[in-house]
Image (spheres, grey):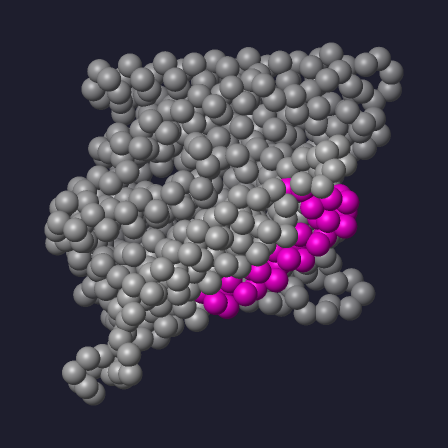
């Protein structure tokens, strides 16, 4: 289970890094969203992966750690709000400047679609 | 009762003020919002002063909801936190006074966002928990995203998009490093983590090092250390003066976090992970000074000049931190206070200059005379010699302390030429800018845009802070030495947090 979990987190992170390095705002926003998923999964795993146990000490032999779950919850809330904000910002920039290029806004007009 | 809960007030006052400001206030809404804002900022200042007096004798620990550390979240005010809280309050009040004369009308909810920003900054300084630090970072970032766009316009939007994307990535890295550190130590309380990290060995220590270095990258991004500074000149140069002036404290939040975490958790007592990142700080800090000075010299826009001045100050502070000994940290804190106040003053001043010059705005070219030519010129001269470090004001004294802090031959050989060279380049750039804008003006009648004296007062207040820093340099450097002393002996902090948080 640990291997599968690690591969999932790694793949998500790799994809998100690739997307964030793109030159247009839409892939970047998608990349940020994926990065926040990867981070949430990673945070969840920091309490070790334990299946079917209670988060109460003494209730059974193994206990699961409740703190990472609380952290993930906080991170999800903040990440969700920030995704919404960055989408709105990207749309606003697209509308105001007329291009979704992050750096050079005239690029698309000069060289056609990238 | 009040002294017991004093430490929560710098967080609660701005929060309540911001919530009140968000209410619909009828026709003269902005008027009431300004009153609430000014009252709240003045109250925060009073509370901050009381906090500094309180922490003179003890470290204040406040366990939120009476949940004791390391399980609950604690607020901790030692001398360093109290100084930073006071600095924020001292900066925020003049900036808000300046903003209340028109700039807050450029976009909606400026006043509330301002208070939320202050709330986030105060919280980041006062918290004793790493995850809580992340949450307060997010609060201050979210309000800064909105403030950066205040006033609208293409240049601001573009700068904001870059800033938001970079900081969201930074937040993700912050969470990853917290996850790593939590996974290896099982705690998020800074004092508790300091104790646990020191016991790590072998592979665990290596993982903790990795987590610590990711944390270092995050704080370096916030404080704009090379090579993570590219967002700063653009963001600071394009936003409005008030926002830029308030942001003068933002890079210092990053520096505070580096000072706190890398003296407490990864400091001298940390066993296998001791002095993590100090080697990087030294070289990157020196390079940041160099790049910042070249940027100051190369900018054709006075706002951008000031933005690069921020960069030079960041480099200077982090290089000084990497020297590691008590005098260096004391010098760093002295310089931090000086640079925050004078940068804030410069951003406000440049904003007025740009408005009064009309079409040429903030570009460093020949232009029309300004309506309040003499006054602005005088203030600019004063602020410029302070920020460059020419005697007699605080810039000179703080640079002297920093140069004195370099001990060994190699340190002197690298630090002195770079800091003195950067000072020289700053002097050239600022005297060129000043003479172009104030002496080489076009013939004819001056522009008719002028500013109310309250706005000049705001700048004067901030500069008076620099003057006070010069007059009371002895007292103040005594205080910064005491802070350095406290930081060098984290045992006191740790034992206070783990045993002392008995308040409700």
Q: Nearer the viewer, residue B129 or B96?
A: B129
**Residue B271, horizontal then vertical, whole percent:** 13, 46
Q: Is residue B237 left or right of residue B310?
A: right
**Residue B351, horizontal then vertical, whole percent:** 68, 34
Q: Residue at x 29, y 14 (%)?
A: B413
Q: Quadrant of residue A8?
A: bottom left
Which corner quadrant holds the N terminus of chain A? bottom left
Is residue B247 among what the camera can see?
A: yes
**Residue B151, horizontal then vertical, whole percent:** 72, 47
**Residue B38, horizontal then vertical, whole percent:** 61, 54
Which region is colored magenta?
A: A75-102
Q: Is residue B285 above or below residue A28?
A: above
Q: Residue at x 87, y 20 (%)?
A: B445
Residue that lies at the very extreme toward the bottom in this rendered image? A59
Q: Quadrant of residue B156?
A: top right
Q: Is residue B379 magenta?
A: no
Is residue B375 among what the camera can see?
A: no
Report the predominant secondary structure element of the magenta stretch: helix
Q: Nearer the viewer, residue B396 or A53?
A: A53
Q: Is residue B24 above or below residue B264?
A: below
Q: Nearer the viewer, residue B323 or B160?
A: B160
Q: Is residue A48 left or right of residue B201?
A: right
Q: Residue at x 78, y 33 (%)?
A: B450
Q: Is residue A78 magenta?
A: yes
Which corner quadrant holds the C terminus of chain A? top right
Q: Nearer the viewer, residue B353 or B455?
A: B353
Q: Residue at x 39, y 17 (%)?
A: B418
């Amino acid at each position: 289970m640990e291997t599968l979990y690690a591969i999932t987190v790694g793949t998500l992170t790799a994809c998100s890094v690739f997307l964030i390095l793109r030159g247009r705002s839409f892939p970047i926003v998608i990349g940020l969203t994926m990065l926040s998923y990867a981070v949430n999964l990673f945070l969840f795993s920091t309490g070790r992966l334990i299946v079917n146990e209670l988060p109460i000490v003494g209730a059974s032999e193994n206990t699961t750690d409740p703190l990472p779950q609380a952290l993930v919850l906080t991170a999800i809330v903040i990440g969700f709000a920030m995704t919404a904000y960055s989408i709105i910002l990207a749309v606003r920039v697209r509308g105001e400047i007329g291009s979704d290029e992050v750096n050079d806004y005239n690029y698309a007009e000069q060289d056609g679609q990238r | 009762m009040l002294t017991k809960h004093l430490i929560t007030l710098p967080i609660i006052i701005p929060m309540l003020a911001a919530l009140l400001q968000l209410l619909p206030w009828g026709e003269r809404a902005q008027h009431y919002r300004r009153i609430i804002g000014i009252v709240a900022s003045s109250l925060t200042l009073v509370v901050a002063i009381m906090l500094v007096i309180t922490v003179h004798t003890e470290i204040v620990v406040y366990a939120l909801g009476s949940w004791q550390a390391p399980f609950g979240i604690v607020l901790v005010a030692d001398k360093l936190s109290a100084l930073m809280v006071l600095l924020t309050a001292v900066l925020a009040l003049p900036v808000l006074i300046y903003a209340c004369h028109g700039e807050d009308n450029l976009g909606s909810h400026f006043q509330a966002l301002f208070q939320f920003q202050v709330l986030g900054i105060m919280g980041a300084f006062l918290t004793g928990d790493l995850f809580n630090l992340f949450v307060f970072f997010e609060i201050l970032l979210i309000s800064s995203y909105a403030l950066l766009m205040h006033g609208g316009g293409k240049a601001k939007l573009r700068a904001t998009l870059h800033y938001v994307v970079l900081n969201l990535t930074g937040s993700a890295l912050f969470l990853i490093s917290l996850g790593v550190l939590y996974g290896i130590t099982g705690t998020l309380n800074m004092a508790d983590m300091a104790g646990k990290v020191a016991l790590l060995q072998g592979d665990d220590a290596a993982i903790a090092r990795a987590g610590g270095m990711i944390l270092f990258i995050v704080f370096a991004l916030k404080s704009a250390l090379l090579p993570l500074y590219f967002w700063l000149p653009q963001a600071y140069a394009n936003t409005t003066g008030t926002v830029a002036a308030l942001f003068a404290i933002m890079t210092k939040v990053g520096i505070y976090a580096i000072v706190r975490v890398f003296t407490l958790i990864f400091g001298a007592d940390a066993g296998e992970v001791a002095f993590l990142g100090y080697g990087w700080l030294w070289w990157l800090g020196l390079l940041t000074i160099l790049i910042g000075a070249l940027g100051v010299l190369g900018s054709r826009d006075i706002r951008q000049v000031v933005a690069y001045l921020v960069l030079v100050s960041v480099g200077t502070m982090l290089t000084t931190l990497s020297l590691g000994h008590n005098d260096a940290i004391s010098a760093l804190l002295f310089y931090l206070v000086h640079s925050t106040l004078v940068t804030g003053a410069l951003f406000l001043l440049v904003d007025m200059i740009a408005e009064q010059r009309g079409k040429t705005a903030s570009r460093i070219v020949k232009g029309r005379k300004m309506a309040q030519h003499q006054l602005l010129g005088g203030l600019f001269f004063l602020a410029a010699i302070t920020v460059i470090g020419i005697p007699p004001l605080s810039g000179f004294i703080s640079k002297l302390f920093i140069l004195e802090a370099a001990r060994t031959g190699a340190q002197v050989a690298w630090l002195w030429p770079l800091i003195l060279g950067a000072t020289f380049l700053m002097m050239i750039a600022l005297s060129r800018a000043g003479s172009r804008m104030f002496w080489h003006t076009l013939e004819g009648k001056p522009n008719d845009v002028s500013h109310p004296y309250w706005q000049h007062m705001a700048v004067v207040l901030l500069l008076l802070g620099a003057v006070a820093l010069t007059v009371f340099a002895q007292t103040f450097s005594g205080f910064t030495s005491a802070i350095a002393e406290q930081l060098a002996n984290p045992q006191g902090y740790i034992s206070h947090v783990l045993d002392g948080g008995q308040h409700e």
